[in-house]
Amino acid sequence: MPQIVDFEKVSTVGLESSPFAGALAGLRANEARYYKNKYDHVFTVTPASQATETVDWVSRILKDERDIVISARPLEATSFEVDGIRMAYVFYESGLSINVMYGLEDGKKRAVGFKLSEGMEVPEELASRFKFARQKSKLAGTIRGSFFVIKGEY
């Protein structure tokens, strides 16, 4: 059953096993607020075990594009379409959030984004490949993020 992410009352439900549950919940709420404000989209998440298609799609893109395999356990995922863009998110036990922005029309933007919860170390599989910029969020504290452009078709 999909769970609506409330960005007014931040909850760690679904993320309790993460050592960064509070920060990861804030990061998830930050995304929910963005999609509500920009697209009037209600951001929902499903346990990763029930969203294997989304988790597998994100994992395939990471593997095919950059030979990246995330070692952390996925906790939650979501996939939806807004404004001609397929979006997918996977939230990991390590505090990592990965999103895929995939423009459905040829020539539209396609990228993978990484966001690190406040307090977590950069995962080993990403540390030597990406530089992470910092941004402040009222809901998530300091978020560190990076991205790469998708070249293939998925």
Image: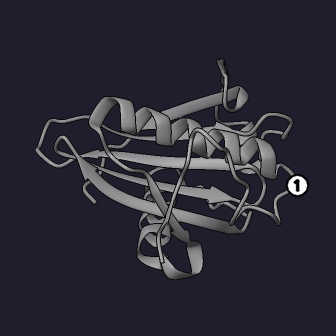
Q: Which residue ends up furthest to the front in the rendered image?
A: 9
Q: Is residue 51 left or right of residue 145?
A: left
Q: Residue furthest bottom?
A: 50
Q: In this view of the protein, which residue sits in the foreground, 123 or 17? A: 17
Residue located beneath label 1 in the image:
19
Quarter of the picture containing the C terminus is bottom left
- The crowd level at tag 1 (other Cα within 10 Å; few <14, some 14-19, many 20+) is some
Q: Residue at x 77, y 41 (%)?
A: 23
Horizontal side of residue 5 vs 71, given as left or right: left
Residue 29 placement, left or right of 127:
left
Residue sitting at x 66%, y 67%: 75
Residue 95 image offset from top left, x and y in percent: 75, 49
**Whole-percent x, y for residue 118 in the image:** 79, 34
Question: Mark 1 is on which residue type?
Answer: Pro
At 52% from the left and 70% from the top, the residue drawn is: 46
Residue 132 placement (x, y as % from top left): 67, 26
